Amino acid sequence: MAHKIGVLTSGGDAPGMNAAVRAVARAALQKGMEVVGIRRGYVGLLSGDVIDVNARTVSGIIQRGGTCLYTARCPEFRDMEGVKKGYDMCVKLGLDGLVVIGGDGSFRGAGDLSSLGIPCIGLPGTIDNDIQCTEYTIGYDTAMNTAMEMIDKIRDTTQSHDRCSVIEVMGRKAGYIAVNVGIAVGAEAAITLEEPYDLNKIAADILKAKKNGKTHFLIVVAEGVGQTDVIARTIQEMTGIESRVTVLGHVQRGGSPTLRDRVLASEMGYHAVELLEQGIGNRIVGLKDGKVYDIDLQEGLAMKKPFLHKRYEVLTNTAF
Ligand code: ADP
Ligand code: F6P
């Protein structure tokens, strides 16, 4: 059983990370473990930038966006030399368990550290939902709700001006946000890396709908496509409809987490502590068939995540 554990957040932040930190800390303290918070992810692990955590340290954070432990990207931790330094710091701090809240890169670091003998548990914290072995990541729901609310506002002005709005949502490597948000705002199209798209077809559909009385249009584009300006210009040229681009950007990473993210983060954090309590490491906690579970870290990273093809079909077949 672990006696003293660390918790850190790593990579891009996500709403709900604080709820996860709180759950890890409270559950571990209740089980009689000591807890330290490591600041700025692996950067803080390498430099020993830690704070002692008691039940009050994590008071009043469950509803807050961002991460109270701060986060960072740490290139040094990509090499075994850096990981070895991290191991030495864990030994120095007396840590016999570590919870890493972050994305797949963070999990690789956690796997490397586990291989050296520090049991590590990965909790999926990223708005992109691009972690293979889980149906939902912490922050995904909040980010989608934020994007949906923003696009609802964009619709108002788009409608007033008889325009087409092309809105870029986050997702460097994944189109999950784009497809779900596209459905939720009633977009005419969602353009993602995972599905082929045809601007000629979209423009033709727009013109047909215009003939039938439709006056404004919304197109959601996943950031990873990298063509948002070009798409807007092309649609304008092909249809003659004035088009505008909005890049939602980092607004999607902030804000108070939704109920779903708070509950998911709490359940996952609790599960991580249950594993460490038994001395189990090298696992990722995920959601499968709606239930929290854990999987071998390397096996989880090697999985291929299915795309939302059916949902994409729903969007494209209910759009006009
Ligand atoms: P993001 O996608 O937001 O950059 P990640 O979780 O993928 O977040 O990466 C965060 C951090 O994880 C990196 O800055 C680095 O410290 C660590 N990391 C990334 N890749 C690896 C790797 N292959 N091995 C070990 N650690 C890694
Ligand atoms: O957290 C993942 C993500 O939201 C990507 O979708 C996006 O491209 C990236 O973070 C941007 O992160 P940053 O601006 O921190 O580099």
Image: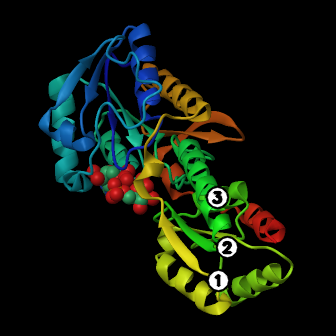
Q: Are marks 2 and 1 in contact (CB under 8 Å)?
A: yes
Label 3 secondary element = helix
* Residue identified by numbered label 1: 241
Kindly identify the residue that appears in the image at 53 percent across and 47 percent down.
Answer: 143
The answer as to whether callout 1 falls within 8 Å of ligand 2 is no
Q: Position of residue 62 (x, y in %)?
A: 46, 24
Identify the residue at image location x=20%, y=27%: 50
* 220 or 275, nearer to the observer: 220
Q: Position of residue 126 (x, y in %)?
A: 46, 47
**Does 164 appear above or below 44?**
below
Mark 2 sits near ligand 2, with its Cβ under 8 Å away = no
Q: Position of residue 192 (x, y in %)?
A: 59, 71
Q: Earlier in the sequence, mark 3 or mark 1?
A: 3
Picture quadrant where residue 94 is located: top left
Farthest front residue in view: 160
Real-space Cα separation, disc 3 to disc 1, in angstroms: 16 Å
* Mark 3 neighbour density, 10 Å: few (under 14) some (14–19) many (20 or more): few
Instruction: Mark yes or no: residue 305 visible.
Output: no
Left or right? Give the position of 156 relative to 201.
left
Mark pair 2, 3: CA separation: 10 Å
What amino acid is found at the position of numbered circle 3 in the picture? Answer: Asp
Secondary structure of the residue carrying tag 1 is loop
Q: If the image is split into quadrants, where does the N terminus sit?
A: top left
Q: Quadrant of the C terminus?
A: bottom right
The numbered mark, 2 or 1, whose residue comes first in the sequence reads 2
Dot 1 crowding, Cα within 10 Å, few <14, some 14–19, many 20+:
many
Q: Is residue 229 above or below residue 181?
A: below
Q: Nearer the viewer, residue 221 or 165?
A: 165
The residue that disc 2 covers is 162
**Residue hosting label 3:** 156
- In the rendered image, which quarter is residue 141 located in? top right
